[in-house]
Image (tube, rainbow, N blue to C red):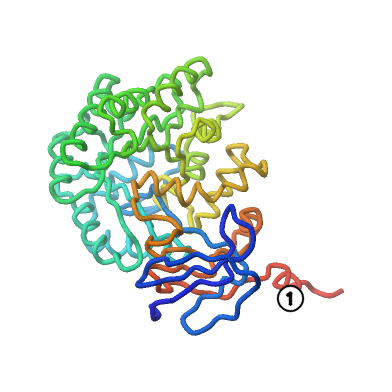
Amino acid sequence: MTDCLNAVINARLQGRDGLYSLAIENGRFGAITSQSAELKALHNQLDAAGNLVTPAFVEPHIHLDAAMTAGEPRWNQSGTLFEGIECWGERKATLTRDDVIGRAEQTLRLFAAHGIQYVRTHVDVTDPQLTALQAMLEVKERVSGYVDLQIVAFPQEGIWSFRNGRELMEEAVRLGADVVGGIPHFEHTRDDGVASVRWLVELAQRHDLLVDVHCDEIDDPGSRFLEVLAAEALKLDYGSRVTASHTCAMGSYNDAYCSRLFRLLKMSGLRFLCMPTESLHLQGRFDGYPKRRGLTRVPELLDAGLKVAFGQDSIRDPWYPMGNGNMLRTLDSGLHACHMLGMNWIDRSLELITDNGAAALHLQQYGIAEGLPARCVVLQGQTPYEVLLNQRPVVASVRDGQILVQRAAEDPMAALNNTLVSV
């Protein structure tokens, strides 16, 4: 890391015209002032060169314990969620502390290079030894200088349907998990799924923890655990601390049911996470043609005033063999798949990988405003549209006033011209 910056200058900010100077004092943003013209950078100033500056990126949903294990011990040939769980069950039996730590840190360094400073990882606790969880708790401390890591106690094979599932969840909370997870659609029966949701929300409230449930990650329109989760959150006044991940079945619900459901969702105030690249890959596998997209109703949720964020879900694991850590790639895929390429959506699209993810993680000190931690990224482009067109790496990532990442801006046309062959 470098010495602490005292300002970021020549910055463009979302929703504001012109250039701005962002003062930094003791690792926090100071005064944010409009510039009448471009400034020349002085000592310990970062020149944004007229590019857009946003809060640091948020990765709200990843599985670090499984990252970089694609093809081990075998490939998921069907591309289904369920074969992925089978492959992971075989790989999970070989986990060691060093194995988990090495792959997780490799992935988090990749994320940091792309401007991600906040990460929520689901960690499988359907393992009597809790090997991955204990390793990830160590990783959390090791990476604290460049990323804030939240850990979800995630029962990959169910709470009711896995032997000692409840005891393992409680032990994970005792050891230090930040968030209580669940997977009700994978439980043996609907009754078990409902019981698991009610139990996990009560567990979280009892320990003052957040909730993040893999909810209805299936194309079955009869999978309706979202209404159970929302009702429990509403009953306990816990909605802003509860996240529903995936909710793929919502893409198969009929509109009459959704009309009633959305009334409950707005009352509960749940947060929603959509993982577009992974869902496009995993869902629709049991369909003939036409094949469903398998995504939740992102624009409708946003129009209803609910917070929705995009996540990557997997990096080269049994469920998804691809992934490079670039949140702009995920954002681009999601906007395409959700029919959100109108300029009204593009102009506000970056909130899907910044502010809305921060809301899901329940971050209290996030954003670009005086007094908040000076954590931001300098993008390549003056507007969200320009940023998305080329999806180039961040120019800089600043954390608490120090530069974590800095690279030269790229000119895609110059690079193209240099590679063209004259005839």
Q: Amino acid at mark 1?
A: Asn
The residue lying toward the viewer, choosing from 109 and 305, is: 305
- Tell which of 153 and 255 is nearer to you: 255
Q: Nearer the viewer, residue 252 or 299?
A: 299
Q: Is residue 54 left or right of residue 65?
A: right
User: Is residue 241 placed above or below 129 in the rendered structure?
Assistant: above
Q: Residue furthest top?
A: 256
Residue 15: x, y in percent? Answer: 59, 52
- Residue 89: quarter of image: top left
Which residue is rendered at x = 38% and y = 60% of the image? 372
Residue lying farthest right?
423
Residue tagged 1 = 418
Q: Residue at x 84, y 75 (%)?
A: 422
Q: Residue at x 35, y 66 (%)?
A: 146
Q: Is residue 397 left or right of residue 228?
A: right
Query: Up-down: is 201 above or below 34?
Result: above
- Percent across and percent down for residue 345 are 61, 42
| Quadrant housing residue 164 | top left
Residue 250 position within the rendered picture, expressed as x and y whole percent measured from the top left: 47, 27
Mark 1 lies on a secondary structure that is helix
Q: Position of residue 115 (x, y in %)?
A: 46, 63
Up the image or down, 308 lies above or below 373; here it is above
